[in-house]
Image (spheres, grey):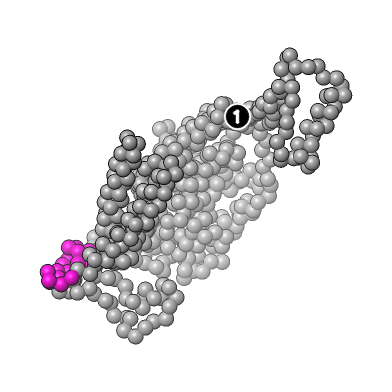
Amino acid sequence: MSIWSNIKSAFQPRYTINFRMEDALAFIQGQSESELYKTQPHLRTVISFLADNVAQVGVKEFRRVSDTDRPRVTDDVLINLLGRPNRDMTGYELMRQLVSDLALFDIAYWLVVQDPERDADRFGSWKIQPIPPSWVTARSEGSVFAPAVYRIDSGLGEGYQDVPASSMVVFHGWNPTDPTMGVTPVRALKDVINEQVQAWSYRTQMWKRGGRVGMFLSRPKDAPRWEEQDRKRFMQGWKEFQDKGALAGSTPLIEDGMDLKRVGFSAREDEFLEVTKLSLQTVAQVYHVNPVMVGILDNANFSNTREFRKMLYSETLGPTIRMIEDRINAFLAPMVGAVPDAYVEFDIRSKLSGDFEEQAAVLSTSVGAPWITPNEARATQNLPAVDGGDVLTVPLNVTQGGQASPRDGGPPARDPDEPDESAERSKQVVERWKGRLSKSVSSRLGAGAKPEDIDWMKWSGELQTDLACATGSDPIVAGLQAMKETQAMQQHFKEAHHADQAD
């Protein structure tokens, strides 16, 4: 009977852990990493963010022939196994669990064993089964640097199973006192998590025990005394303004100088929001994740968010990805009998390649000409092919103008005596735009608005779009012209407004 058969039943779900808030408040320092992940949303947010973003990056296999010749391998036991590690998991799920285990425990285990039920041609009869780190105990048996056996015990009453180290691929971080395993970052976060749990407990107590009073009416001390009949009359009338009352939604008339005052929970005064942000920010910092990427948008803008996205797959996830690649190439590849000189890489380039417009511009510049045919473009829009559409159309300014790229040097030279149709169209577009802008801005200024209240960026974007469509110019060139025209109009209206104010 194989090792996998002996421990197979341990992976079936048998029970559910019931964890109460009271336990978290009383034993937060003694809770395991698994319990904290189940109960603390900020810890789960950051870990799931890391795991999902690594798992979504595809893994590719290559064979190193030379430094300049590395053909891709698409059908090999290694890449097939990483794409479908076992009957119940996909490659995405395998990587997500791997990174989750590393982030939570700083160690992860893959049990790699033979399975006669698997296809020998595709998988070499191998199977990868991730093991929860909380189930595994390393037994050195004489060597402190290389464990000889790993004991797997699920804690479900099924007993344990000793697995030789040769059947286990181990991923782990750095530990100052133990070279065979890492140190969970959660240990450094328990005080912060404890503080957050206490804050949640306080808010829960307020909701449970605090008075449900949203507002109250007060009468001045010198107001006439109410008789019981007067009090009942007022209370009966006030109920008419409550839910389902005859006067609900209308404005009550308050007599005798009474005041209506609001009371209630104030998140700003109690700084609950700031405490929550601090907790999430601290967890993100421990895992080297920029807080903007997990939802703290206080200082976020389009420019820095774009750069943070690039940093995600370099500074943030880069070290983890490199460690996974090295472990797979050094230990898993020879274990399963991959093709000689094979290695795997995460396809990071696909995540850093930018949006479609950026890719199109770079490819066009690199090729020196348009890079798709008319029929290929029509196919993306679900349109049928046309005759002659399979030929790549190359602009004359590239084939005859001697330029290195269709994006270099602008349009081809023209005869000075010929009319510049593009410039004429551009001038007409600008004049029409100025007319619309002047009419709109003058109307708003006449109604009391200031030049600073005008959305100049909107007008600049509108002109950029009109110029690009009418003249076929590069969007960047059109944007620069639109910005220049907008600034001139903005300055014109500012000066006119100041002159009117002075008069």
What's the amino acid at mark 1?
A: Ser
Where disc 1 sits, the SS reads: loop
Residue visible at 75% across and 17% down in the picture:
223
Residue visible at 30% across and 59% down in the picture:
431
Q: 317 or 223, which lies in front?
A: 223
User: Does residue 349 appear in this view?
Assistant: no
Instruction: Name the image quarter holding residue 1.
Output: bottom right
In the displayed image of the protein, which residue is found farthest to the bottom? 387
Instruction: Name the image quarter holding residue 334.
Output: bottom left
| Magenta-highlighted residues | 403-419
- Indicate left or right for 165 with 41 as reference: left
Kindly report the secondary structure that dominates the magenta region of the rendered protein: loop
Task: Determine whether 448 is above or below 166 in the image.
Answer: above
Residue holding disc 1: 266
Residue 225 point in image, percent of width and height: 81, 16
- Indicate left or right for 444 with 500 as reference: right
Q: Quadrant of the C terminus?
A: top left
Q: 309 or 174, which lies in front?
A: 309
Residue visible at 41% across and 69% down in the picture:
75
Task: Determine whether 186 is above or below 489 in the image.
Answer: above
